[in-house]
Image (cartoon, rainbow, N blue to C red):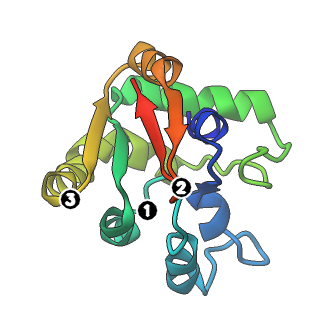
Amino acid sequence: MSLELGRVLDLPVVHIDAQYWRGSDGSPSERWPELHRELVAGDAWIVEGMKPGTLAERLKRADTVIFLDLPRRTCIRGVVERRLRFRRRPRPELGRPDRVTLAYLRWVWRFPHDVRPAVRAALASCQCEVVTLRRRHEIDAYVGGLRVVRVEPTGDAVLHL
């Protein structure tokens, strides 16, 4: 979804996982907090990914948040399908092979219980538009319905949904 939004809106897309896992051995970047601040310092961007520890900082700078609140089976199926599609080849948006571990699958499965409540609370208190999509067909309809009507002199796109 993020790549399609970036194409439609002509905005740079930042994949959180690609930036976070930048250590030379594929470990988390030691510069992650600083790097995250740099990534969201720009005037316009699309950030794809979760990393709850930096969510509040992104929400302060965002004008719109699209929260994909998909059923856990859909999320697990997506992880498995991506793994099978790319096998040991690098995923284009990550620049490295996917890491699918039992711990990651457990995190995805437990997300509704362990992470979603805090994300919802953060979204409820942010000063931006929040769009929650709960099914794949909703995502397709949302992205398919976006059209850039005009671009303001400030560079902000005015959209028609």
In the image shown, does 15 or 20 lie closer to the viewer? 15
Q: Is residue 158 visible?
A: yes
Query: To which residue does mark 3 refer?
Result: 127
Name the spot of residue 46 as percent of width and height, x first. 53, 52
Kind of residue sitting beneath label 3: Gln
User: Is 27 positioned to the left or the right of 57 in the image?
Assistant: right
Label placed on residue 51 = 1
Q: Is residue 48 visible?
A: no
Q: Is residue 147 above or below residue 20?
A: above
Distance between mark 3 and mark 1 Cα atoms: 19 Å
Q: Secondary structure at mark 2?
A: loop
Q: Secondary structure at mark 3?
A: loop
Query: To which residue does mark 2 refer?
Result: 153
Q: Quadrant of residue 19?
A: bottom right
Distance between mark 3 and mark 2 Cα atoms: 23 Å
Kind of residue sitting beneath label 2: Pro
Residue situated furthest front in the rendering: 153
Distance between mark 2 and mark 1 Cα atoms: 33 Å
Kind of residue sitting beneath label 1: Lys
User: Is 25 positioned to the left or the right of 102 in the image?
Assistant: right
